[in-house]
Image: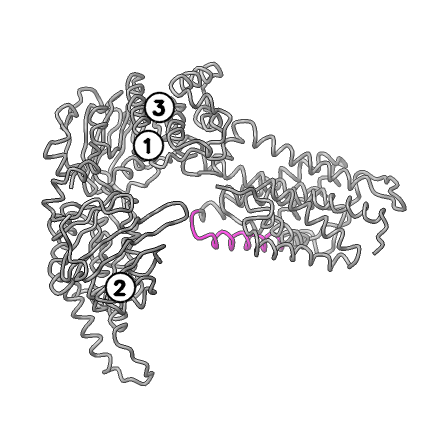
Amino acid sequence: MDIPFDQLLIQTINGIVTGMILALVASGLTLIFGIMDVVNFAHGELFMLGAYVGVIVLAATGDFWIALAAASLVIALLGAAIYLTTLRPLLGRDPLTTLLSTFGVSLVLQNYALWQFGPVARKIQEPFTGHFTLFYLDYPWYRLVIALLSGAIIGALWLFLKFGTYGIWIRATTQDRVMAQAMGIPVPWVLTVVFAIGAGMAGASGFLFGPLVGVNHAMGLDWILKTLIVVVVGGMGNIAGSIVAAIFISLLEAYASLWVSPAQAIIVSFVVLILTLLFRPTGLFAPSRK
Amino acid sequence: MSLIATAPLLEVEEIHTYYGKSHILDGVSLEVGSGEVVGLLGRNGVGKSTTLKAVAGLVHASRGEVRFEGRTITRSPAHRVARLGIGYVPEERRIFPLLTVIENLRTGLDRQGVTAARKKELLEKVYTYFPVLAERRGQAGGTLSGGEQQMLAIARAMMLEPKIILLDEPTEGLMPRMVSQIREIIDVLHREHVAVLLVEQNVPLTLEASQRIYILEKGAVRHHARAAALQVNDAVIHQYLGV
Amino acid sequence: MTVELFSDAFLRTEDLTVRFGGLTALNQVNFAVQRNEIRAIIGANGAGKSTFFNCLTGVLRPSSGHILFDGGEITGLSPDRISHRGIARSYQITSILPNATVLENVRIAAQSRRHSWSLLAHYRAYRDIIERAELMLAAVGLLDKANELAANLSHGEQRNLEIGIALATEPKLLCLDEPTAGMSAAETHDTMALVRSIAKNLTILIVEHDMQVVMELAQRITVLHYGEILAEGTPAEIQQNPRVLEVYLKT
């Protein structure tokens, strides 16, 4: 089999770019699951709404950075609101309850977007135009930029969790919610903030990814499925695991699309999911806990 | 009957708790004075741990009242109870396994109104009393031995600068050498004027370390006396704790 | 330890051992109970009492050793086979059917003793099952609540219903797992009277923490400690046993 090296390299870069965005979305989802045992089905819609908010602010101000900040903040606040109204009252019950609740929220948000913005996808102008020549291809700078930005955001999250009082509060609450309370940590507040952070990260990734695919009300659906796969493969609640899993799966899909169409390449993710569930259900990249 | 002269630091009045339909605490009343060590004895399953959890706000009391420094805290959320100055050391220790020793301590240390200097002071004090924690300060809590985890659990509660510490069976599962260390720590707390409500199965240790004793059975206090007036071989001890 | 006529024992275990990974929950336990005896099993949490019951009732398969009951080997049999052999159990956490009536709860257990494979059997064929269920309810003092939903009973009544359900399976050996847990002093007293009244022609094993119940009900007591039998004897003997006191009072 003769694959041209340049195609391989391009797909590697594509895989990493998609992987970084996916990692950003997935780490938010797994952070939420790790601390409150909630599978947030509305995560894809937060991604989608982030794209829309970003688009609107970008159109209004013309400034990419303000739009990115707005997408993150507005969706973070939306996340907090969703948590306080639909999730907090249900915590501690059967996990199916919160799952159904977030699923319901996702339906509401999808239809809201449909009603508000209409069914036609919006094409967003890439904020950084310009290409560099990668072999025979004009590779857009923008793709590299979003990979770097995603990495930066994830890095900031890691630093925040590792050092600093609030990082300790979040990690303590994740490990033992009851003892965290007994140590004076305001757990209800911590849970709200973590949900907001996860939502904000989804919102940011939606806006970053928007120019690559066009923004429409259903874009969350593709992403939630892939995000869930990444979270399971990486180990639920394991942030580092989901980052590695995101890049791993995206690379596999990118390479697979050298032979099959991208629509079929997604089969690779499902195969990885099934193998993980069969042989290492706690996650391929999960460290042996306990 | 109140055996203490000054107003009590902690007052528990006729609290009832349920677990589903199971009536666990059936009207428990007790008091702890400022700086006092009070022992809570009783067989397994009588409600000793539940009493501590009800005071800490981790278990809901459906009836009755808990007052701390005169202020009612009965249905306050646990994190607020902790901030008021009630430290809790559970039976299973429950240190945060993936946080380092110092991060565990910081969960109690990082509070509003504590200066950096004071934090340093508190850490130094804890390292003096628990040198093994100083040695292992960068290690993850889950890698410590049982005795070390018990030290950490107590030290962590001390970081809250509490006025009272609720200790649930601190010597359970520990070797005799560690048991005497725990005994010393209780004395240290007493010297530092921190009150202790001590739940224990080890009768001699409890009689030695406490000023007063309550004996619990079937969810209520059945006997109350000064520790000095009780001996291990007393009939009342055998009645409620023996076989 | 007195010499037991082990070979005559109604229920006995031979070197019963249960290991969970690195933890030995029961270690070579040799236990024997005579027919119609009331035996209490006591010990600290984690001593192995529930594990022991779980082995007897087939919920847990022992790692090694044998359990012999009424002349037959029951080691490793499934719980339903063991129930048919005549061992019944009440649980520490109430496991009645909350949405069925009190009578229905007991009737379902009573049915297990009489198979009726015919879909066309007349309701009169069930008369005897219903009668038996009512008899059981009378025995546990719940006949007047027969048509109440089980969920509406008080805690003490629910625990007694559990005993009634166990009795309805016509057991030869009844295992009671902390029957007075969570009960008030009054309810405990009632349950103790109940157990005394059903004890004729029945062998009873009872795990309890409430020493008053143990001392008043048990003819003999077995003390478990870290998965081994620490002592066995009459209530008076156990109360004086220095090793038992040491363990309980940590002197």
Q: Is residue C207 left or right of residue B114?
A: left
Near-viewer residue (C8 or C41) = C8
Tell me the SS state at disc 1: loop
Q: Which mark is residue C149?
A: 2
Query: Which one is closest to the eye, mark 3 or mark 1?
Result: 1
Residue linked to disc 1: B174
User: Residue, x 18% and y 74% (percent of image)?
Assistant: C131
Mark 2, chain letter? Answer: C
Measure the C-alpha gap from mark 3 to mark 1: 25 Å
The image position of residue B229, as x and y in percent, is 12, 25
Specify few, some or many for label 1: CA neighbours under 10 Å numbering under 14, 14-19, or 20 or more: some
User: Residue, x 68% and y 47% (percent of image)?
Assistant: A248
Tell me the SS state at disc 2: loop
Near-viewer residue (C52 or A120) = C52
Disc 1 residue type (three-letter): Leu
> Is residue C185 rendered magenta in the image?
no
Q: Is residue B241 visible?
A: no
Disc 2 residue type (three-letter): Leu
Range covered by the magenta-colored residues: A92-110
The coloring applied to the image is one colour
Tell me the SS state at disc 3: loop
Measure the C-alpha gap from mark 3 to mark 2: 48 Å
- Magenta stretch, main secondary structure class: helix
The image position of residue C54, as x and y in percent, is 31, 56
Disc 3 residue type (three-letter): Pro
Specify few, some or many for label 3: CA neighbours under 10 Å numbering under 14, 14-19, or 20 or more: some
Residue B238's place in the image compared with A91, above or below, is above
Residue linked to disc 3: B162
